[in-house]
């Protein structure tokens, strides 16, 4: 059976290329039955001990890994058949894990281990026990039977609704295609024009194909002079998965139900709102602390944002004759203003960041920081675009593995993310199961036989996701539950990712990342200096926009009962007005595609990006300080070794605040974040 069904093979890496929809149900039947048997065995344990818990590990890990493969394939190579079987099994998986969380005998087993053996356990195992007990409580293990049943129903329904939300965004995005002439695309860079022509040809259409995928959509908004076309695309993008499209894809119908169910579940558990419940597993203490943190940043950013807007409106009127700047004008006007102020364009910069060279330079940086090597290797993959690498120490010993899937395509969720394939653990025979991660992005592919060229923002995105991957891959924790990214507080999980972004702005790093697509030359210092000068161009506006997302999210999950399908947009606009942001058109339905909070893990947690940026900026400042003291490169192997030891290696085995203090010698300070964003006094 193992050989016949790839989802049941856990000997090595997942056999992605062999998995078919018809494998899913039989595999889950076996894995769920095996896990249920292990639970029944654990329920009979009378002499609870740490070792007695091991009966649960392999069956639950295997179930999680197999379902993770199915969920991953559903997000990157979606098909009607795979979606059908995935959706059909969501209730099975949700119910099974909710039942585990509510299992009073298992709960008692963990509490008994804490009572009898806790003092003799090492700190990592203590964390595992503490996290597990907290997990039982948050799953409703202490609830009376009637409330347990309702809580279980809520969790099942939420799994279905959030999955449907994500699929609606994907379908609405993939459904849009516009075929236009070259004249309508005046201003579009040559490589984007070639890509649009190739896309139309693939569809056996004349002209040029424009879609709502970022590599197609964003260059049009930044460069195309045709204002009517930009408005058409903006409206299509900002109304995705709303009442303006197909009824079956309308997320406006799902959001009130998602919010109501989250609120009900939180109330059942004894919290005032979902925001309070969300923060139990995070660094922040309360929703009010989060709101205060965000509001303080907003007040600091506001004058910079207002100055940015005034400059942009003045330039739009003078340069383009635009009397009233609209949302579909901002990207174009901003790019032209930046070009004029700093005498360079994103298109000029992009030609230096060819994808193979960026990867080579990224791997070189990681080698210099941590003494590691990424080595191209072979593994079963889910698409021909995907590459696999072994991560090795300089002595050739294996650390882990990494998949990279970098290009946008139909049937693939938008955005960028990292996920774990398997975690590190010490196995019963004394060997180590090495961790494996995957990185997914949505960059443009190369055209006409040339390597893909990445805008600098895409380079930053790649570094960001690599930071997440290194957090998972460089763990030295032996317990699966808290190794790598597992068990890390959500508002600290962005620390390693945002930390890596800083290296994209270092002269000591950039030459190794660059190779001009025509001349082969590295980026010249004068152009880099212009990029650096423009780094915080309109950063006040960018920060305020991120704060809007964060405040909207937390406020929404504190006042969800006040939001219905009819006034969701009004709620969003009220937050924008509070932050003095320009209001979008009445038809804008941004929340309907806000997958981070309605389909991802960032519900009442989007603030984590800014919270963690305080940590990441301050952590990076340690490298800057070392460089200032020594006069050497910011790529410092000694400081890198400390960062690896105190932040990356420990995973979720101790609180993030302790890990930061161990690295920095003190609590985090906000100064570096303000400086990096150009908001210092």
Image: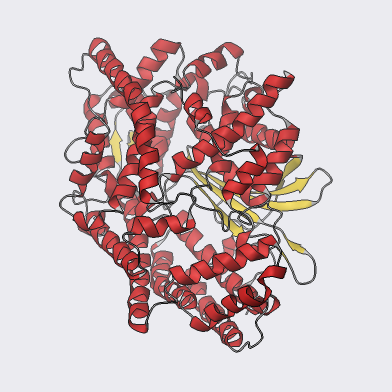
Regarding residue 417, the answer to whether it shows in the image is yes
Residue 509: horizontal and vertical position, in percent?
65, 26
Residue 517 image offset from top left, x and y in percent: 58, 24
Q: Which corner quadrant of the image does residue 102 belong to?
A: bottom left
Front in this rendered view, residue 456 or 613: 613
Q: Can you say whether 541 is above or below 428 in the image?
A: above
- Identified at 51% across, 18% down, the residue is 531
- When the figure is inspected, residue 58 is found, relative to residue 146, above or below; the finding is above
Q: Quadrant of the N terminus?
A: bottom right
Horizontal side of residue 598 vs 642, given as left or right: left
Task: Spot the residue most to the right.
Answer: 395
At x 42%, y 46%, the residue is 414
Quarter location, residue 263: bottom left
Quadrant, the C terminus: top left
Percent of width and height locating residue 64: 55, 68
Residue 311, image x, y percentages: 30, 15
Q: Is residue 174 above or below residue 32?
A: above
Q: Is residue 167 visible?
A: no
Q: Is residue 367 left or right of residue 137?
A: right
């Amino acid at each position: 059976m193992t050989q016949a069904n790839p989802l049941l093979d856990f000997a090595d890496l997942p056999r992605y290329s062999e998995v078919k929809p018809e494998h899913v149900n039989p595999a889950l039947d076996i894995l769920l039955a095996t896990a249920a048997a292990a639970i029944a065995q654990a329920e009979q344990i009378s002499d609870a001990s740490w070792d007695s818990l091991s009966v649960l590990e392999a069956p639950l890990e295997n179930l999680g890994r197999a379902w993770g493969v199915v969920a991953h394939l559903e997000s990157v190579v979606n098909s009607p058949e795979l979606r059908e079987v995935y959706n059909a099994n969501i209730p099975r998986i949700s119910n099974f894990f909710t039942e585990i969380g509510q299992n009073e005998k298992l709960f008692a087993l963990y509490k008994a281990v804490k009572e009898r053996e806790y003092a003799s356990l090492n700190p990592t195992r203590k964390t595992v026990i503490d996290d597990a007990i907290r997990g039982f409580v948050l799953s409703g293990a202490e609830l009376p039977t009637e409330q347990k049943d309702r809580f279980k129903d809520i969790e099942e329904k939420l799994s279905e609704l959030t999955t449907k939300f994500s699929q609606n965004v994907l379908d609405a995005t993939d459904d849009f295609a516009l075929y236009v002439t070259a004249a309508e695309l005046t201003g579009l860079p040559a490589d984007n024009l070639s890509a649009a022509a190739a896309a139309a040809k693939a569809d056996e259409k004349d002209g040029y194909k424009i879609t709502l995928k970022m590599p197609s959509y964003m260059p049009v908004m930044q460069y195309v002079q045709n204002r009517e076309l930009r408005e058409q695309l903006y409206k299509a993008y900002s109304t995705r998965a709303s009442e303006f499209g197909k009824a079956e894809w309308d997320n406006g119908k799902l959001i009130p139900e998602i919010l109501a169910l989250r609120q009900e579940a939180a109330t059942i558990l004894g919290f005032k709102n979902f925001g309070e419940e969300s923060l139990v597993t995070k660094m922040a203490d309360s929703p009010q602390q989060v709101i205060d943190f965000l509001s303080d940043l907003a007040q600091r950013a506001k004058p910079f944002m207002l100055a940015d807007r005034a400059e942009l409106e003045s330039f739009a009127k003078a340069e383009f004759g635009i009397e009233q700047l609209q949302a579909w004008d901002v990207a174009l006007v901003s790019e032209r203003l930046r070009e004029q102020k700093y005498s360079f364009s994103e298109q000029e910069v992009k030609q230096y960041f060819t994808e193979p060279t960026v990867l080579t330079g990224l791997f070189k940086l990681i080698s210099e920081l941590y003494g590691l090597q990424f080595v191209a290797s072979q593994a079963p993959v889910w698409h021909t675009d995907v590459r696999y690498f072994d991560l090795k120490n300089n002595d050739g010993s294996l650390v882990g593995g990494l998949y990279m899937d970098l290009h946008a395509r139909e049937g693939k969720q938008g955005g960028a993310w990292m996920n774990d394939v398997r975690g590190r653990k010490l196995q019963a025979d004394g060997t180590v199961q090495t961790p494996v991660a995957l990185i997914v992005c949505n960059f443009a592919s190369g055209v006409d036989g040339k390597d893909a060229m990445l805008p600098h923002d895409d380079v930053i995105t790649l570094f960001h996701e690599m930071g997440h991957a290194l957090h998972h891959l460089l763990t030295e924790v032996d317990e699966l539950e808290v190794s790598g990214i597992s068990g890390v507080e959500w508002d600290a999980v962005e620390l390693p990712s945002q930390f890596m972004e800083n290296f994209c702005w270092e002269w000591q790093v950039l030459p190794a990342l660059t190779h001009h697509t025509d001349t082969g030359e590295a980026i010249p210092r004068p152009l880099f200096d212009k990029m650096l000068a423009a780094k915080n161009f309109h950063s006040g506006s960018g920060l305020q926009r991120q704060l809007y997302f964060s405040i909207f999210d937390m406020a929404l999950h504190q006042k969800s009962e006040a939001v219905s399908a009819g006034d969701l947009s009004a709620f969003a606009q009220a937050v924008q007005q509070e932050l003095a942001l320009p209001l979008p058109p009445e038809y804008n339905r941004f929340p309907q595609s806000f997958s981070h909070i309605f389909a991802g893990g960032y519900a009442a947690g989007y603030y984590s990006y800014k919270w963690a940026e305080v940590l990441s900026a301050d952590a990076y400042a340690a490298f800057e300080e070392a460089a200032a003291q020594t006069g050497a490169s910011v790529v410092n192997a000694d400081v890198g070794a400390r960062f690896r030891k105190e932040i990356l290696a420990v995973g979720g085995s101790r609180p993030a605040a302790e890990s930061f203090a161990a690295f920095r010698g003190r609590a985090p300070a906000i100064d570096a974040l303000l400086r990096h964003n150009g908001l210092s006094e």
